[in-house]
Image (spheres, helix red, strand yellow):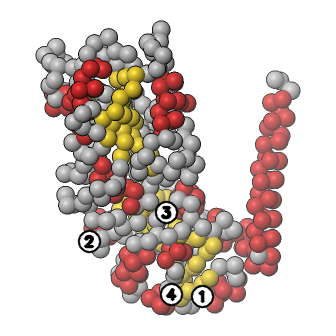
Amino acid sequence: MILSQPLHQLLRPVSKHISGLRAAAEIISRSPIPGLKLLLDSRATPQTQTQPDVYPFAAYLGRLFDCTHAIAIGQPTAQNLRTLFPQFEIVGIVGEADVKRYRERYGFARWVKLSDLASATLPTATLERSIIICSDLVVGDDGPESLLLQLKAWMAHAPVCVLAAPNCDQTELEELLRAEGFNLEFVGLTLSDDVGYEKKTFLAVITKTPPSVSNSVRAPDDFHVVAFMAAYNEEDIIVESIKKWTSQGVSVHVLENWSTDATYNLITDLTSEFPVTVERFPPAGPSPFFDWGAMLARIEQLAGELEADWFVRRGADEVLASPWLGLTYKDGLYLADQAGYNCIDHTIIEFYPVDDCFEAGMDHEAYFRHFDFKHLSHHFQRKAWKNYRQPISTIPSAGHDVIFAGRKVYPF
């Protein structure tokens, strides 16, 4: 251990240089002369970087959304472009005075004049795989009104946009973006430069414009959702708990863990009237101890066998709701599905009993009103996923996180 620590400290900077050399080699191999210019320019970048976190953050979101293209609006520096290239195909939107220089210097990208924005048609298939970065937006210039109009049109297809504006009235710009109908996922501040490290630059994360969210939005009749529920000695709430799903058009499959009270009989009574199925688990009979891992393995198996558009896992003592007032959970899943997501995270709120007056059959959601929002038992609550018949993994997280290939979590 004493010998390996200095060796590790020696190899760490070496591995960092090797990684940088690999990235540089990839840039040059993709576009030899422009790539070399990009590397040289990025090394010659002035010490002070404006908005240093915007492009790295955008690249992270681009990877998160499986983007293949990046639309860069403004005046991206060589360091900015190196953050994107060669992982993304780049479309640059720059001022008329700059477009010739960018085209000559960085021929690996497509460069368009800001004044030609309206005619710079991009295929829908490209927009659907694009991260849009709009930095140095200056409200009050001649261009922003038409720029925002074009952005709005693009955001009907593009999954995500990062917009940064220095030295602006943040409240005014946020109100403007909302008034224009942009879907703002996040609004805040980012670093203005890497010298003073002051967060004075407005930052907005905009996502694909979703269908209008209103009480009239409804999932189609053939949009099928199945909820998995584990139950053991839940006779006081099981009927009410199941009906909270079925009243929203969700089918329920219960893994009943050989309760010693009336839970199983109450569930079977519901199967003739509601979309409810039940199996006793484990099938051979009661186990000597509670085996949650085995139950999760059974749910993973069922998710590969049952017909459904989406699956949800919830406990008998849990209530899951959509974040939109007046919209059912099933309809909320449908909206997230239409926006391109295939997994749902939930905000947990834990309610505690404060008396002994609750009686079997009462509405537990209405009865328990006291909650703790600070000391949460689990931060991840990714309990709903779209059915591609893909293998899923829930056991390592004890059922609080569902892992599968190509996952896109809402809200991201």
User: What amino acid type is highlighted by mark number 2?
Assistant: Ala
The CA distance from mark 3 to mark 1 is 25 Å
- In the rendered structure, which disc, 1 or 2, sits on the residue that comes first in sequence? 1
Closer to the eye: label 3 or 1: 1
Closer to the eye: label 2 or 4: 4
User: What amino acid type is highlighted by mark number 3?
Assistant: Ser
Compared to residue 170, the image places residue 97 above or below, namely below
Residue to which mark 2 is pinned: 179
Characterize the local packing of mark 2: few (<14), some (14-19) or many (20 or more) Cα atoms within 10 angstroms: few
- In the rendered structure, which disc, 3 or 4, sits on the residue that comes first in sequence? 4
| Whether label 3 touches label 2, CB < 8 Å | no
Q: Is mark 1 on a helix, strand or loop?
A: helix
Q: What element carries label 4?
A: loop
Compared to residue 393, the image places residue 49 above or below, namely below
The CA distance from mark 2 to mark 4 is 25 Å
- In the rendered structure, which disc, 3 or 1, sits on the residue that comes first in sequence? 1
Characterize the local packing of mark 4: few (<14), some (14-19) or many (20 or more) Cα atoms within 10 angstroms: some
Closer to the eye: label 4 or 1: 4
Compared to residue 12, the image places residue 411 above or below, namely below
Residue to which mark 1 is pinned: 99
Where residue 352 appears, as percent x and y from the top left, is: 25, 23
Closer to the eye: label 3 or 2: 2
Closer to the eye: label 3 or 4: 4
The CA distance from mark 4 to mark 1 is 14 Å
Residue to which mark 4 is pinned: 120
Residue to which mark 3 is pinned: 192
Q: In which quarter of the image is residue 187?
A: bottom left
